[in-house]
Image: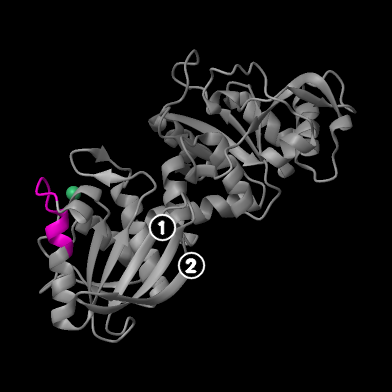
């Protein structure tokens, strides 16, 4: 994972200096050449047009599409949201026909410029603006457009990214897959990342939870300290229920629980959730120390009834951010923890936290 982190940092550094990177769209299994729009030059466009489909897009945030009066094209009410991303094509008014690399570089630079106005562009034109999803690669079904915009933002440039899909060298009638994209990246010494890697990087480097409330919770098993969090991505609300002092030198016994309405509320015997939670509370009471992180994904879960939406890697990242916020750097997880425990182990360690895997007090359940 460290090498992925390093690769992401190199890609962001390249974008910061205006150089291109290759972004692989995991869903399409296709490579895109990407660079910051405010770094557009005739040379960069020439390089892009030579090696790609030539259907050059610029990913913009919704606010800029509105400011520059770039309405969606071909929108029909029945289309899913993602299909309306493409906006009316434009040329900068001071360009010639608009199609040359020189003209397209000027149009792209003008689209990225903060001082441009809607009147600076002719419609239709030869550059295709695309509205990127508001949460970038952390949003729903992200692609190369969201990655291009996120990279420009992370590189502290104007939030606008140029993108175009690489053509296959071996079969110029087709597009470059991941393998060919990697060969192209090697040949031209261009950093390569994928959309999903960028999403992981953002989840690891940007706080994913915000502390909203802190109080004490009197329960039949005793009074616990409780801290409420809101998830930055989906608005889900989570609780950390704590006995003893969080952040103490001794490893904190940790139980992670994903809400199960059936088990937690109704004591359903169709799954082990309710019993696991009750066991965790009893153990916390007996030991006088420990923590239950109770996660509530936005879509309700009830085993055998409602599937919920708790992806294991999202769960482990959320837990890691909550532990960081609480100043808990050493936790105990179970050796025989299921798949979630292993993921948790990795995510927590990525955050510089220490995991004691032996002699765990409670298993990780979900
Ligand atoms: Zn359950």
Q: Residue at x 58, y 47 (%)?
A: 151
Residue 345, image quadrant: bottom left
Residue at screen point 31% across, 65% down: 348
Q: How many marks?
A: 2
Vertical order, 71 against 339 (above or below): above
Q: Which mark is residue 2?
A: none
Q: Is residue 192 left or right of residue 116?
A: left
Is residue 8 visible to the viewer in this orientation of the structure?
Answer: yes
Q: Are marks 1 and 2 in contact (CB under 8 Å)?
A: yes
Residue at the spot x=41%, y=51% of the render?
A: 200
Which numbered disc flags the more N-terminal residue, 1 or 2?
2
214 lies above or below 6: below
Between the residue at mark 1 and the residue at mark 2, the CA separation in whole angstroms equals 9 Å
Report the side of 332 relative to 209 (left or right).
left
Q: Residue 100: image x %, image y %?
A: 77, 22
Residue assigned mark 2: 212
Q: In this view of the protein, which residue sits in the foreground, 169 or 231? A: 231
Q: Mark 2: which secondary structure?
A: strand
- What segment carries the magenta color? 268-277
């Amino acid at each position: 994972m460290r090498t992925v982190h390093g690769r992401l940092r190199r890609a962001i550094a390249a974008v910061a200096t205006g150089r291109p990177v290759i972004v692989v769209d995991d869903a399409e299994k296709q490579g895109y050449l990407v660079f910051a729009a405010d770094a557009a030059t005739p040379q960069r466009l020439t390089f892009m047009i030579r090696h790609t489909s030539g259907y050059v897009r610029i990913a913009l945030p919704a606010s800029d599409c509105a400011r520059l009066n770039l309405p969606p094209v071909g929108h029909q009410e029945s289309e899913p949201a993602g299909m309306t991303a493409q906006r009316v094509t434009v040329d900068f008014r001071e360009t010639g026909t608009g199609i040359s690399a020189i003209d397209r570089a000027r149009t792209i630079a003008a689209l990225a410029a903060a001082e441009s106005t809607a009147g600076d562009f002719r419609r239709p034109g030869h550059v295709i603006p695309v509205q990127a999803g508001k949460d970038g690669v952390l949003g729903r079904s992200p692609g190369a457009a969201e990655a291009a915009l996120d990279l420009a933002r992370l590189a502290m440039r104007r939030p606008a990214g140029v993108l175009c899909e690489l053509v296959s060298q071996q079969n110029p009638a087709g597009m470059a897959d991941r393998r060919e994209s990697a060969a192209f990246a090697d040949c031209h010494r261009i950093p390569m990342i994928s959309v999903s890697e960028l999403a992981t990087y953002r989840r690891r480097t940007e706080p994913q939870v915000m502390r909203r409330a802190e109080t004490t919770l009197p329960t039949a098993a005793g009074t616990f300290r409780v801290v409420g969090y809101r998830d930055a991505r989906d608005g889900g609300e989570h609780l950390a229920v704590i006995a003893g002092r969080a952040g103490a030198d001794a490893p904190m016994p940790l139980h992670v629980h994903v809400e199960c309405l059936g088990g937690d509320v109704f004591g359903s015997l169709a799954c082990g959730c309710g019993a696991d939670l009750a066991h965790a509370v009893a153990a916390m009471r007996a030991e006088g120390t420990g923590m239950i992180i109770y996660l509530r994904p936005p879509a309700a879960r009830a085993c055998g009834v409602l599937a919920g939406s708790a992806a294991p890697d999202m769960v482990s990242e959320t837990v890691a951010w909550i532990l960081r916020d609480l100043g808990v750097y050493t936790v105990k997880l179970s050796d025989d923890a299921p798949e979630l425990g292993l993921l948790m182990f990795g995510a927590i360690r990525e955050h510089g936290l220490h995991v004691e895997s032996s002699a765990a007090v409670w298993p990780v359940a979900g």
